[in-house]
Amino acid sequence: MSVQGSLKTMPVPELLMWISQYQKTGMLEVAAGDHTEQIAFDGGFLIFSSSTDLAKTFGRILISRGLLSEVQHSQARRIREDQRIALAKVLKDLQILPEEEILRMLRKKAEAEIFDLFGSVKGEFRFLDDELPDLDLLPLRVDVAKALLRITQQMDESGDYDFDESGIRLDLPQG
């Protein structure tokens, strides 16, 4: 069974809590703005994320941080496409980066994608039960509830959420 709707009706934080609380397995697709994000879950744990925004791809993030060269990226992409292996797994297999570093960067990437979607109210979502990426993946398991807590703390510290002592929000984000 799939669930779909508008982000106005069910915002991303609520979707993520539903997935986490009910330990859902499947793929969440969120189309907000010009891009679509895909986030896969296994038993409520985030195991994979991807974006149609090329700047948010794992390879581009690693290149921008100086952890991967264009040549290494091209080599890894060829292998990934030929063998249906996630880029992260190819990088580990080629020993370009240690698995711990890859998993750390994957976790940061996934949390950044969730953070970017957090305030989206214009867009559509679709959750596809029991559909997972057809790729050989590294063992990423992000606890969604803990990630949401970190994201809300970060938003609070940056001033994006401003509550008074009653817990009532003083100003709402525009979006």
Image (cartoon, rainbow, N blue to C red):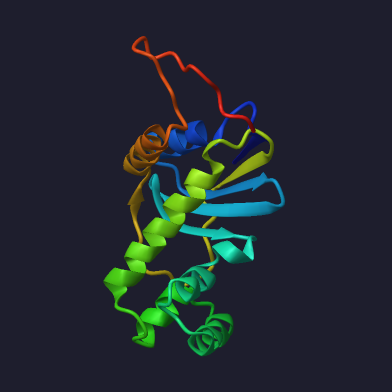
Q: State the quadrant of the N terminus.
A: top right
* Residue drawn at the location 48% of the way across and 84% of the way down: 69
Give the residue furthest to the top.
166
Examine the image and state in which quarter residue 101 appears. bottom left
Left or right of 122: which side holds 44?
left
Left or right of 111: which side holds 73?
right
Left or right of 51: which side holds 147?
left
**Percent of width and height locating residue 143:** 33, 46
**Percent of width and height locating residue 83:** 53, 83
Q: Where 169 falls versus 67 (above or below)?
A: above
Q: Is residue 139 visible?
A: no
Left or right of 90: which side holds 141?
left
Of residues 28 and 63, the one drawn nearer to the viewer in this rendering: 63
* Residue drawn at the location 62% of the way across and 46% of the way down: 30
**Percent of width and height locating residue 144:** 38, 43
Q: State the quadrant of the C terminus.
A: top right
* Residue drawn at the location 45% of the way across and 72% of the way down: 62
